Image (cartoon, helix red, strand yellow):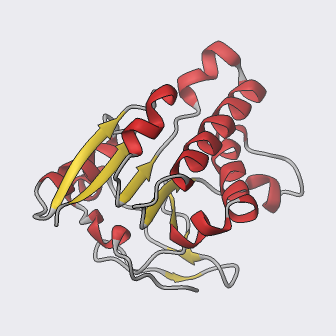
Amino acid sequence: MTKLIVVLGATGGQGGSVVNTFLSTPGWRVRANTDDQRSLMRAFAGAYAIFAFTDYYDYFFELWPDKSIARETAQGTNIARAATKIASLERFVWSTLPNTERFTQGAAVVPLQGKANVDVFIKSELPELYKKTAFVREAGIDMYNVPDFPVVRAQDLMSEEAKAALVPTEESLARMDWSSFFSAQKTRL
């Protein structure tokens, strides 16, 4: 049976490399979506896996810092809520960044915080989705809830939940075998 992966942010570096990987992987179909919020449920229908990405800078110059964080947080939580309604979903990969409020006792690094807010939301409010979620840090700073994969090898970091990894280059992102992130089997740290 052919599995469906839905990729948000499909025109960017990460999403584009995920699309390219699965277009050339037997047994997979790809549905690319560029974050039209009204179409999330339609886009996710029948998905085995979802790769989700938001971009803080899409709204920065229109909304400025605080409202951009709020917008990205709302966009990410909408994506996560929609994903919970997909019965066929086995894997949700959320491209995220470090929770700077947590590490700086409340002083957020503005471009990073919206994604981290979504991490907290998924973990605290959507426990069933959390079990299916791989949180992939964009900067390669750390990853949790994911298996080791061939491009970089994860190593222990600050907590029982976190792993550190080498920062992949754009070239390695393009060549990365993203399929390991979408395996039903994963390493719990």
Q: In this orientation, which residue lies closer to the viewer: 57 or 183?
A: 183
Q: Please determine whether, in this image, residue 131 is positioned above or below residue 29.
A: below
Residue 159 position within the rendered picture, expressed as x and y whole percent measured from the top left? 70, 81
Which quadrant is home to the C terminus? Answer: bottom right
Q: Please determine whether, in this image, residue 68 is positioned above or below residue 173.
A: above
Residue 38 position within the rendered picture, expressed as x and y whole percent measured from the top left? 50, 26
Which quadrant is home to the N terminus? Answer: bottom left
- Seen as rendered, the residue at the extreme front is 87
Q: Please determine whether, in this image, residue 11 is positioned above or below residue 148.
A: above
Q: In this orientation, which residue lies closer to the viewer: 31 or 59?
A: 31
Q: In this orientation, which residue lies closer to the viewer: 56 or 33?
A: 33
Which residue shows up at 51% across the image and 29% down it? 37
Which residue shows up at 42% across the image and 80% down it? 147
Number of labels in the image equals 0
Which residue shows up at 13% across the image and 62% down it? 25
On screen, residue 119 versus residue 48, left or right, reads right
On screen, residue 175 versus residue 158, left or right, reads left
Residue 82 occupies which quadrant of the picture?
A: top right
Q: Please determine whether, in this image, residue 9 is positioned above or below residue 170.
A: above
Which residue shows up at 56% across the image and 77% down it? 163
Q: In this orientation, which residue lies closer to the viewer: 69 or 100?
A: 69
Residue 103 occupies which quadrant of the picture?
A: bottom right
Residue 171 position within the rendered picture, expressed as x and y whole percent measured from the top left? 24, 53
- Seen as rendered, the residue at the extreme top is 62
